[in-house]
Image (cartoon, helix red, strand yellow):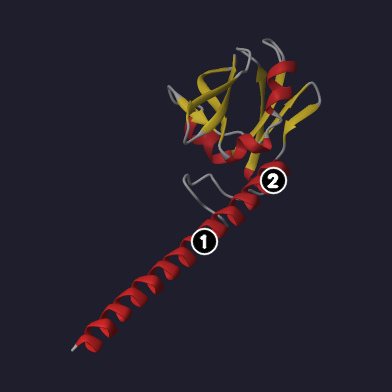
Amino acid sequence: MWTSRSPYNKLVQQDELMTISGTLAYAPSILTLSSADGPTVFVRLNEYPSVIFDVRGVKYRALKADLFVTRVQIGDSIRLQILRDEYVNKLGTRVATVEPYSIEVRNRNYMSLPAVNAAWKEEQVSDRRRVLWLVVGLAVAGALICLIFYRAGVARRSRM
C-alpha cells in the first residue's frame, strides 16, 4: 500500500468504502486555497451540515471538476463513497473534513475509485522519478566536488 501525506492517501479497495447519499447544500466551485494544495472542490450536503467533503491534490486530478461544477446544482441528489472508518469517526463530530473516493450525481459519475487509484499510481511513479533525479543530482554534485578536491590536491603536490 502507498501512503503519503495523509493516512488516507493510498490505494483503496472497494470494500473499504461505503456510500452516503444526500442533497447538495451549496453549488460546488473550484477554489485555490494554496499553491501547495492546488485546486480544491468542496462539497456540502444538507444531511451532514458540519461535514466538508474535500477533493484536492491527487483526488482532484481524478475528478472531472469542470463538468462537475458546471452541471451540478444546489438541491441535486448526490452519492459519495467515503472510507468506512471516516464515516464512523468523523460524521458524528461537530466539524469534519472527509475525502470522497467517488462522486455521482444523476447517474453520472464525476469521480470514481478506479480513477482515484490510477491518480495515486501516477503520483507514486512521479515521486519515484523525483527521488531518482535527486539521487542522480546528488551523485553528480558529489563527483564534481571530489574532482575539484582531487585536482586541487594534485596541483598543490606538483607545485612542491
Please tell me which residue lies in front, 103 or 88.
103
Count the numbered circles shown: 2
Instruction: Please give the name of the residue rendered at 80% of the width and 26% of the height, measured from the top-left corner.
Output: 108
Instruction: Please give the name of the residue rendered at 33% of the width and 74% of the height, measured from the top-left corner.
Output: 148
Q: Which mark is residue 133?
A: 1
Residue 139 location in percent, x, y? 43, 70
Residue 19 lies in quadrant: top right
Q: Is residue 82 visible?
A: no
Residue 46 lies in quadrant: top right
Comes first in the chain, label 2 or label 1? 2
Q: Is residue 66 visible?
A: yes
* Element type at mark 1: helix
Residue linked to disc 2:
14
Which residue in the rendered view is the most extreme toward the left?
160
Say if 78 sits above or below 141 in the image: above
Check disc 1: other Cα within 10 Å, few if <14, some if 14-19, many if 20+.
few
Location of the N terminus by quadrant is bottom right
Residue type marked 2 = Gln
Residue type marked 1 = Trp
